[in-house]
Image (cartoon, rainbow, N blue to C red):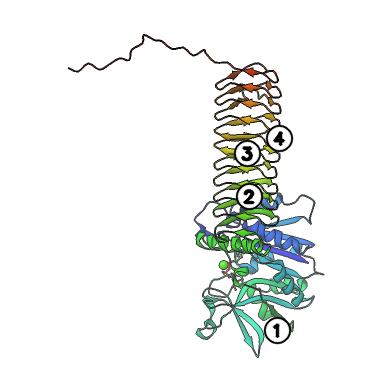
């Protein structure tokens, strides 16, 4: 099968310098949604028609060509003389022996199941249109039927009053036999209210040629909803998020409010996972059995192991959280944070590029960067690994059972030996031997004769 994606329109109502089809929905460009859905149908040819926005669209398409799927071609439509004219730009690239499916780059949520139904309805020799009954069909092309059969499509601006009363609309998504499609496109005229070459005029031509015209229907109206403005983009974003939330609910995930979750990527959940409101998941995130995620967490490309608890207001990116660990509130796990079982990371603690072994804790106000931390280590409040001299990064090693007193600075490279204790306020510049107390702190003294200055009243 051939697939043509129309993406040349300028999208003026988006009020943006970015071409419309590159605006993100769930963190992914609209056009990317359409390409991904098209690829589920394994087309032999896929061609994107672009126009407005210069090289941005073909550049984005080029990134898709990584060898895993059939290469996507692009064709420039300049000037933009209508949807029929747009499809014509792809004609030289289409294989006559397979039907052609036409999609819109600004209609992101069509499901591959609906497209399969349409393709099946078309077979190899019919014209098939994805149509919907709409309560408010204003602005859209109407499906004109005679004796139940589709005979043509009429655009809002060209329609009679009687035709405007028709509620069955053209989604724009069409499958046509390719050889005839090319002939029909070649004979289009722009003799209509908008002076455009309408793709929709091929319907009357098919009827005239005795080619059967059939229809199929999506399972919901939002599948064929297009994006012309930020309002419509926001509406489809919520629709898409609600769809994702419903899939999670069906799988048994507890969402405190399915209307308040944002998944911009893939969220994989085990059994008995609970997610509170206001969380954002990006990239690939895995939440294993029994994980709870508190309110307002941002979790990006991370895996959270079974039974771990993420308390509210954490930012977790590129990190691994071990089983039964407790994170937050207000913790930050940066790329390379790799926590084992039952690790506690508390409020205002930042962990970067560090492994922390089982049962260790850093509960308050610390920075752990480029460190290897053993098991059962206690990192006191205010501890800082000084990992950076302005040019180079160095590692800190803290061995099993060490106890780091509060407000210590570990000036890397440095090692705290097994079972060592650092006194509070230590600035460690040399290794601390195992099993001993190391402390660097000016001796405390008391001045007996000292008197506080007093204010003299005038
Ligand atoms: C089109 C259909 C209409 C249908 C509606 C569904 C025609 C004549 N009309 O109307 O029956 O109900 O879609 O939304 O086909 N595009 C190009 N090049 C062009 C013109 C458009 O690439 O020269 C692209 C746009 O970027 C967009 C799509 O085609 O993705 C549809 O264009 P749009 O102007 O929105 O079509 P409508 O006139 O609204
Ligand atoms: Ca439109």
Q: Determine contact: label 1, label 3, CB under 8 Å.
A: no
State which quadrant residue 353 falls in.
top right
Q: Residue furthest top?
A: 449
Say which residue label 2 marks.
282
Give the residue at x 69% y 18%. 433
Residue 166 occupies quadrant: bottom right
Which mark lies nearer to you, 4 or 1?
4
Q: Earlier in the sequence, mark 4 or mark 1?
A: 1
- Residue 344: numbered disc: 3
Q: Is residue 333 above or below residue 53?
A: above
- Number of the front mark, 2 or 3: 3
Mark 2 in CB contact with mark 4 (< 8 angstroms)? no
Q: Earlier in the sequence, mark 2 or mark 4?
A: 2
Distance from the alpha carbon under mark 1 to that under mark 2: 51 Å
Q: Secondary structure at mark 2?
A: strand
- The residue nearer to you, when weighing 187 against 294, is 294
Q: Residue at x 58, y 21 (%)?
A: 423
């Amino acid at each position: 099968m051939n697939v043509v994606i129309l993406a040349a329109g300028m999208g003026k109502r988006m009020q943006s310098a970015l071409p419309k089809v590159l605006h993100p929905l769930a963190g992914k460009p609209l056009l990317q949604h359409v390409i991904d859905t098209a690829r589920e149908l394994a087309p032999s040819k896929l061609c994107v028609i672009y126009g407005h926005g210069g090289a941005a669209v073909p550049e984005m398409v080029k990134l898709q060509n990584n060898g895993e799927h059939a290469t996507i071609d692009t064709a420039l439509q300049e000037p933009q003389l209508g949807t029929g004219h747009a499809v014509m730009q792809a004609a030289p690239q289409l294989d006559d022996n397979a039907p052609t499916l036409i999609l819109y780059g600004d209609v992101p949520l069509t499901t591959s199941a609906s497209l399969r139904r349409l393709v099946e309805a078309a077979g190899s020799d019919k014209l098939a249109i994805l149509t919907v009954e709409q309560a408010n069909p204003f602005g859209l092309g109407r499906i004109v039927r005679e004796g139940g059969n589709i005979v043509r499509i009429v655009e809002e601006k060209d329609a009679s009053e009687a035709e405007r009363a028709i509620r069955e609309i053209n989604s724009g998504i069409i499958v046509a036999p390719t050889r005839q499609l090319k002939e029909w496109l070649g004979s289009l005229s722009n003799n209509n209210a908008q002076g455009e070459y309408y793709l929709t005029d091929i319907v009357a031509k098919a009827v005239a040629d005795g080619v059967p015209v059939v229809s199929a229907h999506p399972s919901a109206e939002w599948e064929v909803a297009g994006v012309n403005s930020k309002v419509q983009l926001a509406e489809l974003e919520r629709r898409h998020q609600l769809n994702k939330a419903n899939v999670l609910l069906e799988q048994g995930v507890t969402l405190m409010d399915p209307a308040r979750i944002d998944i911009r990527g893939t969220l994989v959940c085990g059994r008995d996972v609970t997610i509170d409101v206001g969380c954002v998941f990006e990239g690939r995130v895995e939440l294993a059995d029994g994980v709870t995620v508190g309110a307002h967490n941002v979790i990006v490309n991370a895996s959270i192991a079974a039974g771990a608890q993420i308390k509210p207001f954490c930012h977790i990116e590129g990190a691994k959280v071990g089983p039964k660990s407790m994170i937050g509130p207000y913790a930050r796990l940066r790329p390379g944070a790799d926590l084992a079982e039952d690790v506690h990371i508390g409020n205002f603690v930042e962990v970067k590029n560090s492994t922390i072994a089982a049962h260790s804790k850093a509960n308050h106000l610390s920075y752990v960067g480029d460190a290897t931390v053993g098991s059962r280590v206690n990192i006191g409040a205010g501890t800082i690994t000084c990992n950076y001299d302005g040019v180079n990064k160095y590692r800190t090693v803290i061995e099993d059972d060490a106890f780091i007193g509060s407000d210590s600075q570990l000036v890397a490279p440095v090692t705290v030996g097994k079972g060592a204790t650092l006194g509070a306020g230590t600035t460690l510049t040399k290794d601390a031997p195992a099993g001993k107390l190391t402390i660097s702190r000016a001796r405390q003294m008391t001045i007996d004769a000292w008197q506080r200055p007093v204010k003299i009243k005038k």
